[in-house]
Amino acid sequence: MANQATSLTRIIKAAGYSYKGLAAVWRHEAAFRQELVVAMLAITLAIWLNVGAIARILLIGSVVLVLIVEILNSAIEAVIDRVGSEYHELSGRAKDMGAAAVLLAIVLALFVWGSILLQHFI
């Protein structure tokens, strides 16, 4: 059944669904909680550093991207776990691909931070 909500009602409902998603990932995913703690520290450092606006956006954006990819990875894992607990090659592959996406996001964040900090302190 299609959602019949319009305008402000739709926005309010969407915000509620988003809140439920954030609460679920916080409650059920230890990796997200750990990454969020690191992200909060990194964002605080990015705000404190004396860098330009673009560098600050890159620093914060790269860290937020890790959180976004972790949420998507957790969603993939939840769907696969819902389908069944028995091992299936495609389920394992999907979970591995989600983990690889998180790893690539972390590597990107480290590269951005390393590049900007190296340039800032040299």
Image (spheres, rainbow, N blue to C red):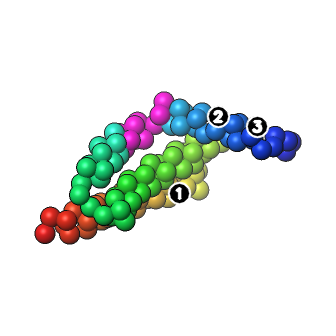
Seen from the viewer's position, the closer of residues 39 and 81 is 39
Q: Of helix, strand and loop, which mostly describes the magenta segment?
A: helix
Residue 93, placed above or below residue 35 = below
Instruction: Look at mark 3 in the image and give the residue it sits on.
Output: 9
| Picture residue at 46% right of the left edge, 37% below the top | 29
Seen from the viewer's position, the closer of residues 20 and 27 is 20
Foreground disc of the pair 2, 3 = 3
To which quarter of the image does residue 40 belong?
top left
Crowd tier of the residue under label 2, counting other residues whose Cα lies within 10 Å: few below 14, some 14–19, many 20 or above: few
Image spot of residue 115 (x, y percent):
25, 68
| Residue extent of the magenta highlight | 26-36
Counting labels gives 3
To which quarter of the image does residue 103 belong?
bottom left
Residue 33 colored in magenta in the image: yes
Asked which secondary structure carries label 3, the reply is: helix
Asked which secondary structure carries label 1, the reply is: helix
Of mark 2 and mark 3, the one earlier in the sequence is 3
Image spot of residue 76 (x, y percent):
57, 48
Q: Is residue 108 left or right of residue 50?
A: right
Residue 112, placed above or below residue 17 = below
Crowd tier of the residue under label 1, counting other residues whose Cα lies within 10 Å: few below 14, some 14–19, many 20 or above: few
Instruction: Look at mark 2 in the image and give the residue it sits on.
Output: 16
Residue 71 colored in magenta in the image: no
| Picture residue at 53% right of the left edge, 32% below the top | 23
The amino acid sitting under disc 2 is: Gly
Image spot of residue 13 (x, y percent):
71, 36
Q: Is residue 55 left or right of residue 85?
A: left
Q: Which mark is residue 75?
A: none
The amino acid sitting under disc 3 is: Thr
Instruction: Look at mark 1 in the image and give the residue it sits on.
Output: 93
The amino acid sitting under disc 1 is: Arg
